[in-house]
């Protein structure tokens, strides 16, 4: 199965024509379009109307996770309803199965990475902040435990590893993602992970457990590739090749 993945569309009220140009060719080259959050710029209904109109030019099935920008105007329920009614499958700690490929999706959240991950200790405000990530990681853990299929793709908006953030200011890292999600993906041995949110980050890396992670932010894809979206082919040989390529690139210091 071929998945075209793109995040950070940041559709604005005046983006008509721009999004369809960015996505040119997806319906020819892919079987599914996966949107990795920050679909709208300010979470406005009029932005979503423009986005849905732009997406109507592409007839392939569409799956989405939401991003932090989609929350900005406190209308996330309405935006999800609009997407769902137009045929987009929105994943929020949930999964879907398309052919032999299961997709789990969640927005993700902040917290940082590895030993320096923020802990639920001290002030209630800090506990509430980090419990958002803990609870969301636990929901995706449950969704994966219930998803029994040959290939499993995980989609997020925030990053699950720090390696695909390379290029961002290091002080921002704890606000760009959380390794709690990589821990879950490694434990369930998912096949591939996509995320966005880190506009200035790097295109790919591996989790500590060796799972390929792609930063499909359109800004990263256009900087490192020849177009704004990332094409992933999910099948046994394709995944092996993907992992070998990322391993080789991470040994080569000159690669992104
Ligand atoms: Fe973004
Ligand atoms: Fe974002």
Image (cartoon, rainbow, N blue to C red):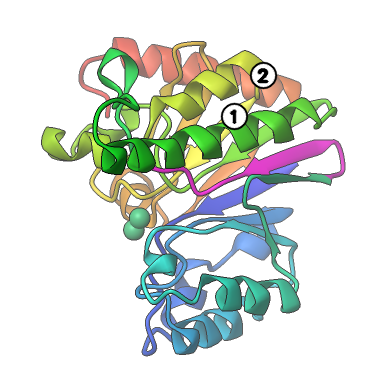
Q: Is any part of residue 234 visible from this angle?
A: no
Q: Secondary structure at mark 1?
A: strand
Q: Is any part of residue 150 visible from this angle?
A: yes
- The residues bearing labels 2 and 1 have C-alpha atoms spaced at a distance of 11 Å
Q: Nearer the viewer, residue 168 or 237?
A: 168
Q: Nearer the viewer, residue 36 or 15?
A: 36
Q: Secondary structure at mark 2?
A: helix
- Whether disc 1's CB lies below 8 Å from ligand 2 is answered no
Q: Is residue 129 left or right of residue 107?
A: left
Q: Nearer the viewer, residue 222 or 162?
A: 162
Q: Which residues are magenta?
A: 98-109
Asked if 53 appears above or below 79 in the picture, the reply is below
- Give how far across and how far down residue 127 sits, in percent: 34, 35
- Give how far across and how far down residue 11 sits, in percent: 41, 76
Q: Nearer the viewer, residue 194 or 17?
A: 194
- Whether disc 2's CB lies below 8 Å from ligand 2 is answered no
Q: Residue at x 48, y 32 (%)?
A: 134
* Residue for badge 1: 192
Q: Where, by quadrant of the figure, is residue 187 drawn?
A: top right
Asked if 73 appears above or below 148 in the picture, the reply is below
- Give how far across and how far down residue 150 sits, in percent: 82, 25
Q: Residue at x 71, y 71 (%)?
A: 84
Callout 2 crowding tier (Cα within 10 Å): few <14, some 14–19, many ≥20: some
Callout 1 crowding tier (Cα within 10 Å): few <14, some 14–19, many ≥20: many
* Residue for badge 2: 188
- Give how far across and how far down residue 130 sits, in percent: 37, 36
Asked if 202 appears above or below 205 in the picture, the reply is below
């Amino acid at each position: 199965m071929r998945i075209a993945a793109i995040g950070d569309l940041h559709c604005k009220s005046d983006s008509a024509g721009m999004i369809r140009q960015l996505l040119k060719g997806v319906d020819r080259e892919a079987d599914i379009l996966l949107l990795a959050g920050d679909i709208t710029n300010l979470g406005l209904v009029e932005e979503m109307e423009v986005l849905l109109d732009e997406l109507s030019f592409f007839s392939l099935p569409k799956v989405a996770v939401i991003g932090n920008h989609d929350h900005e105007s406190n209308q996330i329920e309405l935006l999800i309803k609009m997407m769902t009614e137009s045929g987009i499958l929105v994943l929020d700690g949930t999964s879907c199965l398309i052919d032999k490929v299961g997709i789990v999706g969640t927005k993700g959240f902040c917290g940082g990475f590895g030993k320096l991950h923020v802990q639920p200790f001290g002030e209630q405000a800090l506990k509430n902040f980090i419990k958002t990530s803990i609870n969301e990681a636990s929901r995706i853990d449950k969704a994966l435990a219930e998803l029994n299929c040959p290939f499993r793709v995980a989609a997020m908006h925030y990053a699950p590893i720090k390696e695909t953030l390379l290029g961002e200011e290091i002080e921002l890292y704890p606000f760009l993602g959380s390794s709690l999600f990589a821990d879950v993906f490694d434990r369930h041995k998912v096949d591939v992970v996509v995320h966005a949110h880190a506009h200035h980050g790097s295109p790919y890396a591996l989790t500590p457990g060796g799972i390929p992670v792609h930063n499909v932010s359109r800004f990263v894809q256009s900087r490192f590739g020849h177009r704004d979206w990332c094409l992933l082919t999910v099948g046994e040989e394709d995944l092996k090749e993907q992992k070998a390529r990322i391993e080789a690139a991470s040994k080569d210091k000159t690669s992104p």
